Image (tube, rainbow, N blue to C red):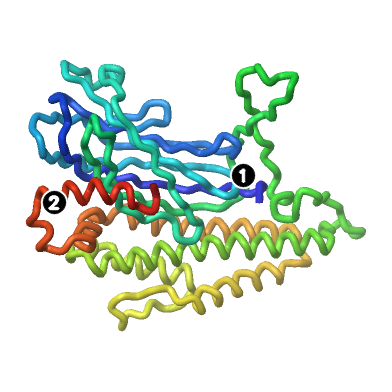
Amino acid sequence: MTEVQATVEFSVELHKFYNVDLFQRGFYQIRAGLKVPPRVPHKIETSLLHPGVQDDVIYSKTFQILYKNEEVVVNDVLIFKVGETLNDIDFQLSLDLYFTDGDYTPDDPSSLQNISGRTLRLHFSLQRGIHQHVNVMFDYFHLSVISVAIHASLVALHQPLISLPRPVKTTWLNRNAPPQSKDSVIQPLENVVFGSSYVKQVSADGRTFLVSDNCLQHAFSLHHDLCSNLLLAYQGLFDYFTSITKDLPSSHRMELAKPSMQVLYERVLRRPYPRSQRHVYIEQLDLEARLAELCEQVKQKAESPDELAELVNMNLAQLCSLLMALWGQFLEVRRFAEAFFCLEHPRQSALAYQELHFQACASSYSSEIL
């Protein structure tokens, strides 16, 4: 569906840095960047509150390493927002280790040099998103580990709002020319809803517009597929949020999130929140019933093409706003790295400090997202 744009947001939490056996004392820094295949039209936005951003690369706070087996708490959260056409998505996250053994200037990123790097392949699903914790080990000559929690979710599906650069195909005539791109054309709402072949025609009485059966079926199918994807993405994020908070110690912040979760549940499904249940998940039957309601509303507008297109756009906008609200609530509740640690390592193994470093190194190679 190249006529539709998807917005995917990533939260990359750099939790702790472990010096297993670095050769040099000095100042170190982690820099992260998100990569999308050049053939896929896309636009990447980055943000971080504390350190800085340069050329779509986010760099963490700079920390000093002096001793072997030293552990440094980084606790930096990197946000990547990707706008792209709705194609098969293949993301890569690059994590680079930078270093200097002399004085450095915080405002000058070039004062540190790149000494090692790793690239993680992120298997993203529109419905399930990404929720992974991985210990990334750098090469043998810079033996160190950064623990990373990666979360990602679809947050919007909508009519193209920005022009995405598309790569220009190369031929034998311009094969030696530098890479070029051209902006994609933003289609009107009616062409997105009714299809690219839609041509607006006025009815005989001049009161409304005519739409062919093929264009109507395109509108119904498009609306069904996009709403289904948004509802499934919402279900996946909501259910994961519920399951992970069951294993976290109670906190004031999570108690504050519960009323918002209840309100979002009721607004998405248009049914009362089951307050008698301690841990609430979104049932598939409730999701299908809500999708059927939305589709029936659109079908009732078949005789009014303008109202139909506006209703499709309004339904998508409402679902996107609720999904983004849930994603924002999800990011507000921190301590996910601690939850993963508690689940994967029992209390007894946490006492074996040296052994944890070897487990961290081994798990970085066995992770599903590497």
Q: Which mark is residue 355?
A: 2
Q: Which residue is mark 1?
A: 160
Quarter of the rendering containing residue 368: bottom left
Left or right of 153, for residue 220? right
Q: Residue at x 43, y 45 (%)?
A: 121
Above/below status of 71 relative to 298: above
Specify whether 30 is left or right of 290.
Answer: left
Residue projecting furthest to the front: 140
Q: Position of residue 306 (x, y in %)?
A: 73, 57
Inter-mark Cα distance, 2 to 1? 51 Å
Taking the image as drawn, is residue 252 in sight? Answer: no
Q: Secondary structure at mark 2?
A: helix
Residue type pointed to by label 2: Glu
Label 2 with label 1: CB-CB less than 8 Å = no
Q: Classify mark 1: residues with Cα within 10 Å, few (<14), some (14-19) or many (20+).
A: many
Q: Nearer the viewer, mark 2 or mark 1?
A: 2
At 66% from the left and 47% from the top, the residue drawn is: 2
Hey, what amino acid is under mark 1? Pro
The one nearer the camera, 95 or 110, is 95
Left or right side of 331 for 100:
left
Residue extending farthest right: 204
Residue 239 in the figure: left or right of residue 38 = left
Counting from the top left corner in percent of width and height, residue 38 is at 56, 34
- Name the residue: 60% across, 74% down: 293
Q: What secondary structure is found at the residue carrying circle 1?
A: loop
Compared with 233, 276 (above or below) is below
Tell me which label, 2 or 1, sits earlier in the chain: 1
Residue 230: x percent and y percent? Answer: 52, 61
